[in-house]
Image (cartoon, rainbow, N blue to C red):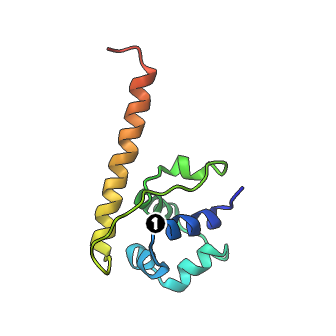
Amino acid sequence: MMTMNEKLKTMREKAGLRQGQIADYLGVTQTFISKVETGERNLTVDQLESVVNLYGYSLAAFADMEQEAHPIQFAFRAQDIGQDDLRAISDIGKIAINSRFMTKMLEGSNVG
């Protein structure tokens, strides 16, 4: 079972992002992200939600320590991904999260 900090690092690496990019996205330093990934520091709830949305997870799904980390895979054409790009990806992640939630809700209802 992965710890939360290990899961964050794994997700970032699988998404092909650098610590500095996540730091810029959250408005913190790369050193802070490094310390988060080693368990020396913690993200705020808002920061954690922003990061997991970027990877296409809900906060509840991410907190499930039994669930393996499988972030949304990105295919970048640009050499460098900036904050605006990451915000757009996060917004798309939120849409994916909501879509999965709505699908589960509709499958569980007797409507239709």
Image position of 94 (left or right of 63):
left
The residue indicated by pointer 1 is: 15
Which image quarter: residue 107? Answer: top left
Q: How many marks?
A: 1
Q: Which residue lies furthest to the right in this view?
A: 1
- Residue 4 vs 30, above or below: the answer is above
Considering the image in quadrants, where does the N terminus appear?
bottom right
Image position of 41 (left or right of 52):
right
Image position of 35 (left or right of 12):
right
At 44% across and 73% down in the image, what residue appears?
A: 17
Q: Position of residue 11 (x, y in %)?
A: 53, 64
At 31% across and 80% down in the image, what residue appears?
A: 79
- Residue 106 vs 81, above or below: the answer is above
Q: Where is residue 102 in the image (x, y as percent from the top left)?
A: 37, 33
Q: Which of 27 and 58 is in front in this view?
A: 58
- Residue 60 vs 109, above or below: the answer is below
Which image quarter: residue 78? Answer: bottom left
Q: Nearer the viewer, residue 6 or 70?
A: 70
At 50% across and 84% down in the image, what residue appears?
A: 30
Q: Find numbered disc 1 in the image and state the secondary structure of the residue it sits on.
A: loop
Graded by Cα atoms within 10 Å as few (under 14), some (14 to 19) or many (20 or more), the crowding at tag 1 reads some
Q: Position of residue 14 (x, y in %)?
A: 51, 66
Q: Position of residue 47 (x, y in %)?
A: 47, 66
Considering the image in quadrants, where does the C terminus appear?
top left
The amino acid at mark 1 is: Ala
Which image quarter: residue 104? Answer: top left
